[in-house]
Amino acid sequence: MTENQRNEFKKLADLYRSELLDNVMPFWMKHSIDTECGGYFSCLNRDGAVYDTDKFIWLQGREVWMLSTLYNKVEKRQDWLDAAIQGGEFLKKYGHDGNYNWYFSLTREGKPIVDPYNIFSYTFAVMAFGQLFLATGNKEYAEIAKTTFDIVLSKADNTKGKWNKLHPGTRPLKNFALPMILCNLALEIEELLEPEFLQKTIDTCISEVEQFVRPELDGLVVENIGVDGSLVDCYEGRHMNPGHSIEAMWFMMDLGRRLNRPELIERAKNTAIRMVEYGWDKEFGGIFYFMDLKGYPPQELEWDQKLWWVHIETLICMLKGYNLTGDEHCWEWFKKVHDYAWTHFADKEHPEWFGYLNRRGEVLLPLKGGKWKGCFHVPRGMFQCWKVLEELASK
Amino acid sequence: MTENQRNEFKKLADLYRSELLDNVMPFWMKHSIDTECGGYFSCLNRDGAVYDTDKFIWLQGREVWMLSTLYNKVEKRQDWLDAAIQGGEFLKKYGHDGNYNWYFSLTREGKPIVDPYNIFSYTFAVMAFGQLFLATGNKEYAEIAKTTFDIVLSKADNTKGKWNKLHPGTRPLKNFALPMILCNLALEIEELLEPEFLQKTIDTCISEVEQFVRPELDGLVVENIGVDGSLVDCYEGRHMNPGHSIEAMWFMMDLGRRLNRPELIERAKNTAIRMVEYGWDKEFGGIFYFMDLKGYPPQELEWDQKLWWVHIETLICMLKGYNLTGDEHCWEWFKKVHDYAWTHFADKEHPEWFGYLNRRGEVLLPLKGGKWKGCFHVPRGMFQCWKVLEELASK
């Protein structure tokens, strides 16, 4: 490596570190913590003012996880730990029905508003309590993570339960999202699982995820396939979400590294590059939110918008791909998406990043947090990019 | 009225009549009828080519209704009647579970894909079979309409049944949509209802609908209020859909005329003008799809898009308001929205209208039909505008 390259990595590592520690986390620490009722506000205006007090379990769990992770991996800061514990206690008390069926949303005070139809409320509870256990050593948190993880696995065949609207039998599909999240979750809570069970779960998830990567489409990824593994020509079967597949591919790279499986890393890297190239908007820049495999009109009207998490997950994935394989395409794409993201999502006047841009890259919603955006993708992305860039610089 | 005005009304009446009979209906007659499996295709490209064969009950019912209505009110054309009956027979055979619980969608062949969670599949079945009964005199159709209407009323308190995700009791809301549709439905099937029951139903629905028109907001309309009638400060409680309230207001005007209640017409007209003014995009023109009462970020990412039905329903409503009250604001708004709609939604190269534009008025999806757009709002709007303009010209 040239000295120039090393300096570029160092400079970028410093940029991401500083954005995380001096800009993004202070924003959430200052504005999101509900000191009166517990838990976190996530509906925050551009400047951090709370505009809605409902509490969404996805984002409650993710903030507990983020704060605990930073405490575990960056610095033993008491304020992070306190904030994580208070969120965890709120979740423990109000987030579920008593049997670890996790609601989707609560009032500010913790009363359930939306019932436990959504499996990802469960998966983010697992992440939260797994990492909070590592931060505190409190076995009760480990127990919650483990019990909830078992419930997630038991629901894998029909994650929506009675809220499932699909008529049984006519056109059975399976979806990419759960095995994809499980790839990440398994590593998050590996200390809590029997090694053999962990290995089996990981193997199953990898093979599930790879079924959505289609050789007959030169490696494109679809979000839904038939239970028999076939492509299905309907809205759901044609549905593509480039950011989602790219995010999955860095989970696969993490697994490949952990399991010492370079061929898995290589495949994931190639799939990720394929999806970035496919998803990139050649007219206005940025990566589309949703696409239709056949180029038909997608059913989602927001398909052409540019979302923060799509771009941040791509940054992480391209950096990991570059770090693990040395493929220069990854570095080129990292730089291109980095430029786009810092120009369009970063807010010059207030901390944290915008979440929702229109196709042209103009701010569509000025929020910093909402029903789906919280203390998660931006800080996790800053942390991941910082760490990979640091590793690159130290080579 | 001056001769000039009369000529303008005549010319416009002719434009809408001709668009309906020479452009829009031939498009659906040519492209939507599935001569092999029965029912209608609704997923049609710009030029009419079928891109997806799934059948959505909303749109199946609405096309039966549209064809029957034209047969009943415009001309006794055998091809319209045949097309209506074949759609009705498909619906009768495959559209429900045997007990008139209407599915949301079917495969091309009629196998259920999405279960009967959506009450509007039921309401559009009522409209379809009510009007098809008037076209054919076939009492079986009347029976289906009446039975389904009773089921709709029986579900009014929890329209989603087991698929309802709202946790009971925490924050009970009621929604504008069902009483609004019932206002229209009651007149559609009035021949099938006992006069006393009809009167009671209409009175209830009018008073329900008017609860969503808020005096404390100078007559703005919200989509959800507390069951106690209060405004609720949450995403759903702040949710506004200008096109939806404007559409409701012409249903109210029709009821006002039928019941000879000029004060009802006057209120509906004022509400409609208020909502058009509120919903109009002063920067790019057109009416926003969704808004937040407090100006907070709406949860729907498509909030700023311009949808065909919003604009067509506004044309109908402004014309009816003008015809029934003479308020010049209605005529001004009609002309403004007419210009916007014919410039942006009408397709110069192929029949039928575009459905989805971005905020700037550029075509977002090139489809003529999809999961939610079928043979309904455009032809109904052309028919309604034609008839009101004809009446205006004959004064």
Image: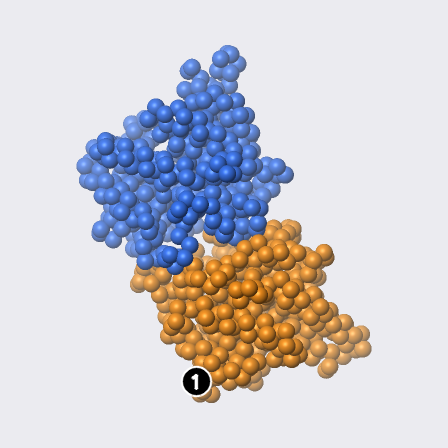
Chain colours: A orange, B blue
The residue located at (56%, 58%) in the rendering is A43
Instruction: State which quadrant residue A275 falls in.
Output: bottom right
The residue located at (64%, 58%) in the rendering is A48
The residue located at (54%, 78%) in the rendering is A131
Residue A97: x and y in percent read 39, 68
Extreme front residue here? A36
Residue A209 appearing in the image: no
Residue A151: x and y in percent read 39, 74
Extreme left residue here? B139
Disc 1: host chain = A
Q: Is residue A321 left or right of residue B389?
A: right
Q: Nearer the viewer, residue A358 or A134?
A: A134
**Mark 1 neighbour class, 10 Å CA radius: few under 14, some 14 to 19, many 20 or more:** few
Amino acid marked by disc 1: Phe
Extreme right residue here? A3
Residue B95: x and y in percent read 28, 49
* Residue A76 sits above or below residue A235 on the image: below
* Residue A77 sits above or below residue B247 on the image: below
Q: Nearer the viewer, residue A67 or B214?
A: B214
- What count of labels does the image hold? 1
Which quadrant is the N terminus of chain A positioned in? bottom right
Instruction: State which quadrant residue A368 falls in.
Output: bottom right
Element on which disc 1 rests: helix
The residue to which callout 1 is attached is A197
Q: Is residue A323 left or right of residue B196?
A: right
Instruction: State which quadrant residue A17 falls in.
Output: bottom right
The residue located at (71%, 68%) in the rendering is A22
Q: Is residue A349 left or right of residue A266?
A: right
